[in-house]
Amino acid sequence: MSVNLMIPDTLSQVGVTTMAMAPGIASSNLLLASNHALSLTAHNASLAQQQGYLLMQTTTICGVNSITTTGQALVAQILSRCR
């Protein structure tokens, strides 16, 4: 068989191979996009949790500071009455 006769056969085989790979490539692209979205969701959830913990710590510190300053002001007021 001459080389010129083999070229169309080779090209048709490449076309069939490309068509046969298309469903696999499409499903892998869908899987990749789904995994990426799921990882972003997990990342956003952990970030929101960290920010929530930071907010809880801040409010706790503000509450403790408020209690201690109120207590100190109360003690100062009581001491000023005793003098």
Image: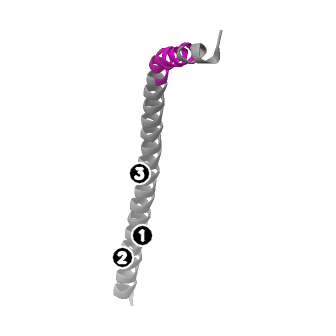
* Label ID, residue 52: 3
Task: Say if 79 sits above or below 46 in the image.
Answer: below
Spatial CA span between label 1 and label 2:
14 Å
Residue 65 falls inside the magenta stretch: no
The 10 Å Cα crowd at callout 1, few under 14, some 14 to 19, many 20 or more, is few
For disc 2, the marked residue is 74
User: Closest to the observer: 49 or 71?
Assistant: 49
Q: Residue at x 50, y 20 (%)?
A: 18
For disc 1, the marked residue is 65
Q: Is residue 17 left or right of residue 49?
A: right
Residue 10 falls inside the magenta stretch: yes
Q: Amino acid at mark 2?
A: Leu
Spatial CA span between label 2 and label 3:
33 Å
Which quarter of the image is occupied by the N terminus? top right
- Dot 2 lies on which element? helix
Q: Which of the marked residues, 1 or 3, is nearer the chain's N terminus? A: 3
Tag in front: 1 or 2: 1
* Label ID, residue 33: none
Tag in front: 2 or 3: 3
Q: Position of residue 29 (x, y in %)?
A: 46, 28
Q: Which residues are magenta?
A: 9-25
Task: Say if 73 sits above or below 51 in the image.
Answer: below
Q: Position of residue 23 (x, y in %)?
A: 45, 17
- Dot 3 lies on which element? helix
Q: Residue at x 59, y 18 (%)?
A: 4
